[in-house]
């Protein structure tokens, strides 16, 4: 108990209030390390720098229960590394808002890739050093090219490509890149023809966008499509949106509200991709 109370973090927290859960966490983690050492021969515990006190408490408990080695060498060791922090100073963690997961069921490969694409220029060099396998020299060269035209986001693209391929595979990363290119023009070669998207890429696209059924009525027109997609709640609102040039279908500006739905060439899977403004996308698919 004295060891625990002597910790600076506990001293400062006691004045402002410290819950029993917080106070006992170090005790439980220390005991856990001791039992791993006793039952499985574990000698090293690793963690972020915020775990330094908990880890060293474990090495101290092991020293006290096992006694000193004849040669004076410690029984157990701790290894801590700097926390990965967001620009705000908050740590990246599983409880943070917008946290990304390696499990594709929790964070889709597309969303995973976009997370890295959206990192700011101030953080990108540090993230490249931490998460890619390039040497310091190679990363410096990449950052120099990035600085020539930051708007091209070369560094972010390299980071997103490298980490996504490492976690999900190069083929999945390529599909995610194709979808991002189609939606946001993130590619280096200009926005591709949406009709050239493969069925696999379209399946990934469908997982990421609000999707509705494509109207079957033969007399359905563009106004009906806009309403079906949820981009407008009334025909008058849909017509106004179209007249203002705020709608595109499969990447092309929409002509007029009276255009027949059948006049739009569908994508490879028979769907239509509607966009309102710059980034509000909706997918219409046949049931």
Image (cartoon, helix red, strand yellow):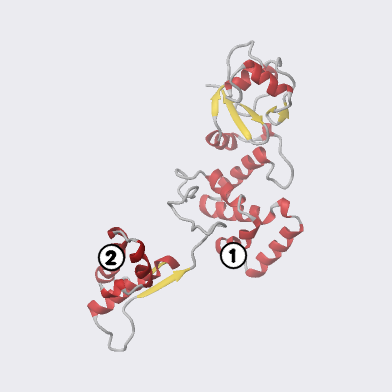
Q: Is residue 273 above or below residue 175?
A: above
The spot of residue 166 in percent (x, y) is 54, 55
Q: Residues within 10 Å of mark 2 (few under 14, many from 20)?
A: few
Residue 43 visible in rendering: no
Which residue is depicted at the point 51% across and 61% down? 84
Decide which of 178, 31 is in the foreground and name it. Answer: 31
Q: Residue furthest top?
A: 219
In the displayed structure image, the side of residue 113 where residue 236 appears, left or right: right
Q: Residue furthest bottom?
A: 71
Which residue is depicted at the point 45% across and 43% down? 105
Residue 61 visible in rendering: yes
Q: Residue furthest left?
A: 65
The spot of residue 57 in percent (x, y) is 32, 72
Which residue is depicted at the point 58% across and 47% down? 114
Q: Quadrant of residue 240?
A: top right
Q: Is residue 166 above or below residue 4?
A: above
Q: Quadrant of residue 272?
A: top right
Quadrant location of the N terminus in the rendered image:
bottom left
The spot of residue 9 in percent (x, y) is 38, 69
| Mark 2 and mark 1: Cα distance apart in space | 33 Å
Q: Residue furthest right?
A: 148
Q: Is residue 71 above or below residue 88?
A: below
Decide which of 136, 5 is in the foreground and name it. Answer: 5
In the displayed structure image, the side of residue 110 where residue 7 appears, left or right: left
The dot on residue 129 is: 1
Decide which of 214, 242 is in the foreground and name it. Answer: 242
The dot on residue 28 is: none
The dot on residue 32 is: 2
């Amino acid at each position: 108990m004295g060891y625990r109370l002597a910790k600076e973090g506990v001293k400062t927290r006691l004045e402002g209030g410290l819950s029993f859960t917080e106070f006992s966490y170090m005790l439980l983690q220390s005991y856990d390390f001791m039992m791993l050492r006793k039952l499985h021969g574990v000698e090293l515990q690793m963690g972020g720098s915020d775990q330094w006190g908990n880890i060293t408490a474990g090495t101290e408990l092991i020293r006290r229960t096992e006694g000193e080695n004849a040669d004076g060498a410690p029984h157990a060791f701790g290894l801590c590394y700097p926390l990965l922090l967001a620009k705000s100073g908050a740590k990246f963690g599983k409880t943070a808002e917008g946290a990304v997961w390696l499990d594709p069921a929790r964070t889709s490969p597309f969303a995973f890739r976009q997370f890295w694409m959206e990192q700011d220029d101030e953080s990108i060099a540090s993230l490249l050093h931490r998460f890619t396998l390039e040497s310091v020299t190679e990363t410096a060269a990449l950052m120099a090219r990035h600085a020539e035209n930051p708007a091209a986001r070369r560094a972010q693209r390299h980071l997103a490509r490298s980490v996504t391929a490492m976690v999900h595979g190069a083929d999945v990363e390529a599909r995610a890149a194709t979808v991002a290119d189609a939606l946001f023009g993130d590619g280096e070669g200009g926005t591709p023809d949406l009709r050239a998207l493969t069925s696999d890429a379209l399946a990934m696209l469908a997982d990421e966008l609000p999707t509705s059924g494509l109207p079957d009525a033969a007399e359905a027109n563009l106004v009906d499509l806009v309403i079906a997609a949820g981009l407008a709640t009334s025909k008058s609102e849909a017509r106004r949106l179209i007249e203002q040039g705020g709608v595109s279908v499969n990447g092309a500006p929409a002509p007029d509200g009276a255009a027949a739905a059948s006049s739009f060439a569908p994508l490879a899977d028979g769907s239509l991709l509607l966009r309102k403004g710059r980034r509000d996308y909706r997918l219409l698919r046949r049931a």
